[in-house]
Amino acid sequence: MEPGTTPTMPENDAPAAEVVTEADAYREAAGAFADSVAIMARLRGPGGCPWDREQNFDTIRKYTLEETYEVLDAIERRDWPHLTEELGDLLLQVLFYAQMASEMAPGDGRFEITDVLETLNRKLIRRHPHVFGEAASAAAGNRVRVDANVDGSAARVLANWEQIKQAEKKKSTVDESLLDQVQRAQPALAEAAKLGSKAAKIRFDWTNWRDLLVKLEEETGELVQAADLPADAAHRHGEIEGELGDLLFTVVNLGRHLGVDAEMALRGTNARFRQRFRLMEQAAGRPLNELEPAELEVLWVAAKDKLKQMDGTAMAGVKG
């Protein structure tokens, strides 16, 4: 509620309480956002935080990636209270970039946080004619005629979204590649899957997922050949890196054929590795670095078996 506003009371005799409307919630959110913008400006301004003032677009990038993954981690752990904090940290990255951009000279690409928000708002309206109406969508820049009557179909929404999105891009030139439509600014695993998917649209793809198993053997053999080069060979590192990349690309596209997201699959494996390693530490009775490789292997197998038993017990409890 704004200062001096008299709370709206229910018409019945219910206990006195303030009725918060959507408009109240929007004003509260806008006020909190404005506070965040002001705080960020002060941190970067004269007399602000020395560390914040020293940062630039390049130094902040790694924190953006870290905060993104911390949001994913909170979601996967269903840690909703912690997710509130992590989303705030992610929002801080947006505020940081916008503040640094506002300090640039106009000719260097200067923009404000307001420009970020207005660009987002126009895009949302432009790409949702089925929600905001075709007139509003057109006023926001949409030049594609799509069927705004989606009848509650998410598939039809996505089809319209892609048509509008493609029309927003510049016209193709003779030098433009089909793969230019895949953004480089994303995790490498996600980029690999999208590159494979885009190539598949012109039927440049493996016919069956089993064909990728043969390709994996081929790429593994080439990696072995690269690793077997003389240790002092000038091109050895580059060869290994290239062959390992080819192997990873093949694995990602195997996941695509099987309907599995490689990034999520690897995150799941990482989580299981953490669990098993912790069980090893608990069962060892002494620091793991004091054990021999054979002893570590025994502990690892035991940890895997224990987790399988725990998972089996949990599933039995669900079925029961």
Image (spheres, helix red, strand yellow):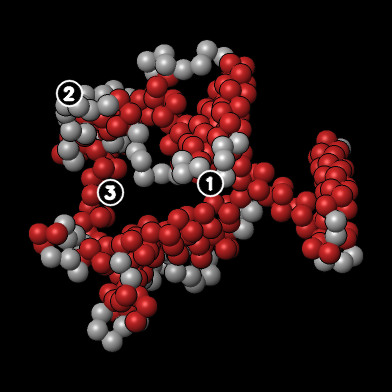
Report the residue marked by disc 2: 174
Measure how far apart labels 3 and 1 are at the Cα level.
Answer: 52 Å
- Pinpoint residue 71: horizontal percent, then vertical percent: 52, 56
Q: Earlier in the sequence, mark 2 or mark 1?
A: 2
Q: Answer yes or no: is residue 213 visible.
A: yes
Kindly indicate whether the residue at mark 1 contacts the one at mark 2 (C-beta within 8 angstroms).
no
Q: Earlier in the sequence, mark 2 or mark 3?
A: 3
Report the residue marked by disc 3: 120
Measure how far apart labels 2 and 3 are at the Cα level.
Answer: 30 Å
* SS of the residue under disc 3: helix
> Mark 2 or mark 1, which is nearer to you?
1
Q: Residues within 10 Å of mark 1 (few under 14, many from 20)?
A: few
Q: Residues within 10 Å of mark 2 (few under 14, many from 20)?
A: few
Q: Nearer the viewer, residue 12 or 57?
A: 57
> Mark 3 or mark 1, which is nearer to you?
1
Measure how far apart labels 2 and 1 are at the Cα level.
Answer: 44 Å
Identified at 58% across, 31% down, the residue is: 225
- Pinpoint residue 138: horizontal percent, then vertical percent: 17, 35
* SS of the residue under disc 1: loop
Left or right relative to 142: residue 213: right
Identified at 47% across, 31% down, the residue is: 193
Report the residue marked by disc 1: 232
- Pinpoint residue 7: horizontal percent, then vertical percent: 38, 71
Left or right relative to 103: residue 55: right
Q: Is residue 291 above or below residue 130?
A: below
